[in-house]
Image (cartoon, helix red, strand yellow):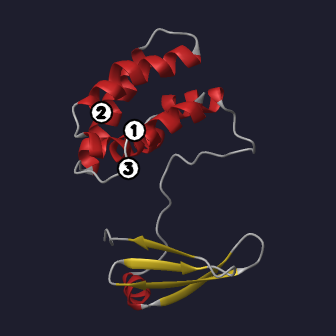
């Protein structure tokens, strides 16, 4: 069921959005409150009600070309911000592996000097689970992973501190 709902969200549109994360978080909190107060026992009916009464009406107010991106962001922020939503998804489609949820952010163990040095670096690498090395180049807000199979991934980033 979760997969069908995700496909619906993804299938709505293909382009960018203008909502800020604050707005997306605000919508996710409203949806979470709705979910907490919902008196439906059946999980499938519960998630359908959440989408039909909260998500779809909100997306209906947004320019159609932006609905896919906004829908995806709400979905992911709901998972991040709403324990009830995560638990509902876990019941609808139990995780294949044992998972441990961390409720607190870890304390940083890096000094200001080390952080500055890190931010000034351009090239990095990390090891994949299978042992392959992935090369990373970070510059001017762009992050490029070069994988061992000659494929690559290009992302953007912004430093928050």
User: In the displayed structure, does residue 156 sit left or right of residue 79?
Assistant: left
The answer to the question of whether label 1 and label 2 lie on touching residues, with beta carbons closer than 8 A, is yes
User: In the displayed structure, does residue 69 sit left or right of residue 148?
Assistant: left
Secondary structure category for the residue under label 3: loop
From the viewer's perspective, is residue 46 above or below residue 134? above
- At 46% from the left and 74% from the top, the residue drawn is 154
Task: Indicate the quadrant containing the N terminus: top left, top right, bottom left or bottom right.
Answer: top right
Residue 135 x %, y %: 59, 85
- At 46% from the left and 42% from the top, the residue drawn is 10
Residue bearing mark 3: 14
Residue 12: which disc? 1
The answer to the question of whether label 3 and label 1 lie on touching residues, with beta carbons closer than 8 A, is no
The answer to the question of whether label 3 and label 2 lie on touching residues, with beta carbons closer than 8 A, is no
Residue 64 x %, y %: 27, 39
- Badge 1 crowding class, 10 Å Cα cut-off, few under 14, some 14 to 19, many 20 or more, is some
Residue bearing mark 2: 59
Task: Indicate the quadrant containing the C terminus: top left, top right, bottom left or bottom right.
Answer: bottom left
Q: On the image, which quarter does residue 113 sit in?
A: bottom left
Secondary structure category for the residue under label 1: loop
Q: Nearer the viewer, residue 23 or 7?
A: 7
């Amino acid at each position: 069921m979760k997969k069908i709902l995700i496909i619906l969200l993804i299938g709505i549109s293909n382009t960018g959005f203008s909502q800020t994360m604050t707005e997306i978080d605000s919508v996710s909190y409203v949806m979470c409150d709705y979910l907490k107060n919902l008196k439906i026992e059946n999980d499938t009916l519960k998630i359908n009600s959440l989408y039909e009464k909260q998500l779809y009406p909100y997306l209906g107010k947004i320019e159609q070309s932006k609905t896919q991106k906004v829908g995806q962001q709400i979905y992911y922020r709901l998972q991040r911000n709403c324990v009830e939503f995560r638990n509902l998804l876990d019941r609808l489609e139990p995780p294949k592996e044992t998972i441990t949820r961390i409720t607190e952010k870890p304390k940083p163990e890096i000094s200001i000097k080390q952080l500055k040095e890190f931010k000034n670096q351009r090239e990095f690498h990390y090891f994949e689970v299978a042992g392959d090395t992935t090369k990373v180049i970070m510059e001017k807000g762009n992050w490029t992973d070069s994988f061992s199979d000659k494929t690559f991934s290009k992302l953007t980033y912004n430093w928050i501190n």
